Image (tube, coloured by chain):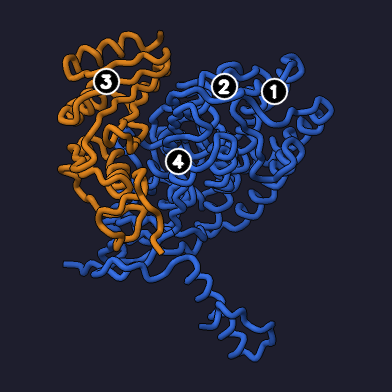
Chain colours: A blue, B orange
Amino acid sequence: MTKRTIVPIGPYHALQEEPEFFKLHVEGETVVHLDIELGYNHRGIEKLSESKDFEETIFLVERICGICSTSHPLACVQAVEDAGGIEVPERALFIRSAIGELERIHSHLLWLGLAGHFIGFNTIWMWAWRFREEVLNILELITGNRNHYGMMKPGGVRRDINDTDIPAIRGMLEGLQDPVKMFRDAVLEDPLIHARTKGIGILTREKAIGYGALGPTARASGYDIDVRRDHPHAAYGMVEWDVVTTENGDVFDKAVVRILEMFESIRIIEQCLDQLKIVRGPVDSNPPFVAPGEGIGQYEAPRGEVFHYIRSDGSNRPVRHKVRAPSFMNVPTNRETVLGETVADATIILAAVDPCYCCTERMAVALDSPGGQRLWGAADLIRMSCEKTWRLMDETGLQGPAPPPTAVN
Amino acid sequence: MKAEITINRILGALGEHIIAHEHKSDRRVYLEIAPETVFEASSVMFEEIGARLQIATGIDTPAGIEVMYHWALDSEDCVVTIRTLVSRDAPELESIAELCPAAEWIEREIWELLGVEFRGHPDLRHLLLDDNWPAGDYPLRKDYGGDPK
């Protein structure tokens, strides 16, 4: 019988540079079990949200994830609007969708680059990230920021898209078509990508349904769900586009779904820009307060549905704010996809769901177990960090200012 | 309403289990059931209706710990939320993780953050909090005092 060994990936992922811990139980080269550990970066955002008013909450959830910095705020404002029965001007809906789709393109390009990096195809990585810059430039033009756009608010958006900016946005979008086509051809035709990703890490449709998989992870397994179509919000019910699905559920299909979705995103943005010429008016209904009630907000983030639930008691802050990021549902599917595969393929399989740990996690405190006594608090961590810096400076002979009194006890 | 037939099927299948029914809008339906019937109701939603478990939410309320299961009817643009109320002293529910693997992580989360026991959960251990987190210290309860000095 082959000896079973544990291969640890984490607690800090060497490639994804995020904190998570995959314990691969292997027999020889074959993965026979996967244990996933989270909690290395838990930030307590749901609890924190209960101490923020409805405007501040949007800024808080915007910082759950740098990549999905529109998805969380959009789902959150939709939950507030659902709870309080707040109307949104039509023009704001088109702006919301345009920003959301730009975010999808930059997120998919980011994943594509990382996926290339994971299989040793670094040219894809550098190209994808180079063209992602163009998308960030468009976002900067519209919102003033490359990330954390600060655009969403209950009742509308904070900034309008100027008519004078639209030709430049169109030009930049047009310039994205060829690079995305190049990536499509590179993935569909490159024999090395086929060899590394086809038939690898298969998630069956049945398992996808059981785990509640979302987004491209679900659609690549033939599970045809997309809340942009199924639960229309923003402007998705007012523009023409198609949901991309494939059937095989392997890493290759997940890549194909994401690449083809970028074409759909460009289609949606172009239609939104057309509509902005016709649909005039305010972009914010300025709701004075949020009526008591409960509301659900859903938004199809690049990784799948983001779900926010908000309960309001009529005061200016939520009684409860539940956040469910898509990776919370997608990461557990790795327990199925990685089984029977080799350790070498495990890295790309675990990355194929486009996991977002900062979304899934939301401070761990070291305890003296028998007594339940906390050993380190925030002040202690700062003190320990200072002490280490001073020790290193001492050892290396580097000069620095005198240590503060709190740092030396 | 797009989901009317399905909603009627759910109401019929759950029958007397339903304590309260709120038809908030065509896209949002809230049903309240007794804690003992959670597994049965979930099995109706997941297996008979084919609904997708979006997530479960736990809330500490003056009346007790409220647990909500949000089920999406994706082809009919509707979210059906099934809620139940358990006592704060000994909150306990039957796990639906064996029925629907999508519930496994969220039940672990509600267990550690709100202290609801999930009977029959295959792997009830800490998900987000430290393994040495003190028993009986539930961060999402309203009386949680935060990090003691």
What residue is disc 4 on? Answer: A325
Q: Which numbered dot is residue A236?
A: 2
Q: Is residue A254 left or right of residue A100?
A: left
- Tell if the residue under mark 2 belongs to the same chain as the one under mark 3: no
- x and y percentages locating residue A45 in the rendered image: 47, 47
Disc 2 residue type (three-letter): Tyr
Q: Quadrant of residue A344?
A: bottom left
Judging by the rendered image, the residue that carries numbered circle 3 is B49
Q: Is residue B84 left or right of residue A102?
A: left
Q: Chain of mark 2?
A: A
On the same chain: label 3 and label 1?
Answer: no
Using a 10 Å C-alpha cutoff, classify the residue at mark 1 as few (fewer than 14 neighbours), some (14 to 19) or many (20 or more). many
- Relative image position of residue A11 (x, y in whole percent): 41, 64
The residue lying at 52 percent from left, 46 percent from top is A64
Tell whether label 2 touches label 1 (CB within 8 Å). Answer: no
Q: Are marks 2 and 4 in contact (CB under 8 Å)?
A: no
